Image: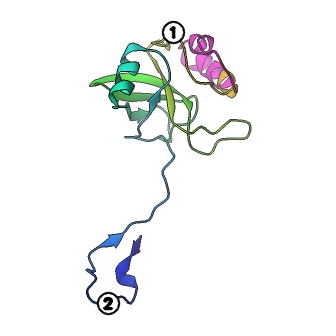
């Protein structure tokens, strides 16, 4: 924390006013705003109204979402699940970094709510989701099938 009272400033500065300087949080954690990139009806309405969904929970042990992780989001007063298909944070080698935090809404079985994904998704997502399909029992192959472009 950076505070004005640590400097020799004139007395007319109010010492209770402090300036907080912290790094930009690019992680997907609780209360992070996300962008719905599929053509599901609820996602289109929320993005058009300017009220993007917020992350409620990240389904992993760390609590920080990465590409391919499942998240629970609050969207238009409802709880929906989604898969992260693009993130701002620094990625592993050969996985692209995105300008926005993108999700695709799914139901409990892993079936996407939309029929098309509007943005390119990473090729590495194929291997990540295929591993999770076998381990978790959910079917994420339909999510890969509706994607039109890969990076």
Q: Splitting the image into 4 quarters, where does residue 86 fall?
A: top right
Report the residue at 57% width, 15% height from top: 143
Verify whether residue 132 appears in magenta.
yes
Secondary structure state at the residue bearing disc 1: loop
Image position of 36 (left or right of 88): left
> Which residues fall within the magenta stretch?
127-148
Image spot of residue 147 (x, y percent): 61, 16
Q: In the displayed orientation, state which residue is furthest to the front.
A: 48
Q: What SS does tag 2 mark?
A: loop
Q: Residues within 10 Å of mark 2 (few under 14, many from 20)?
A: few
Q: Pointer 1 and pointer 2: residues touching (CB < 8 Å)?
A: no
Q: Which residue is mark 2?
A: 10
Callout count: 2
The prevailing secondary structure element of the residues shown in magenta is helix
Residue 30, picture quadrant? top left
Quarter that holds the N terminus: bottom left
Residue denoted by label 1: 115
Q: Is residue 35 magenta?
A: no
């Amino acid at each position: 924390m950076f505070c004005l009272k640590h400097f020799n400033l004139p007395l007319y500065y109010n010492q209770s006013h402090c300036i907080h300087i912290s790094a930009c949080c690019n992680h997907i954690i609780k209360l992070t705003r996300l962008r719905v990139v599929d053509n599901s009806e609820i996602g289109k309405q929320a993005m058009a109204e300017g009220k993007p969904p917020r992350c409620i929970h990240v389904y992993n042990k760390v609590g920080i979402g990465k590409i391919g992780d499942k998240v629970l989001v609050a969207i238009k007063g409802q709880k929906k699940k989604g898969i992260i298909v693009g993130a701002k944070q620094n990625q592993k080698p050969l996985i692209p970094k995105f300008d926005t935090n993108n999700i695709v809404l799914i139901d409990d079985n892993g079936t996407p709510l939309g029929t098309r994904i509007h943005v390119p998704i990473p090729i590495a997502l194929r291997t990540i989701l295929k591993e999770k399909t076998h381990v978790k029992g959910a079917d994420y192959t339909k999510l890969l099938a509706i994607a039109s472009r890969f990076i």
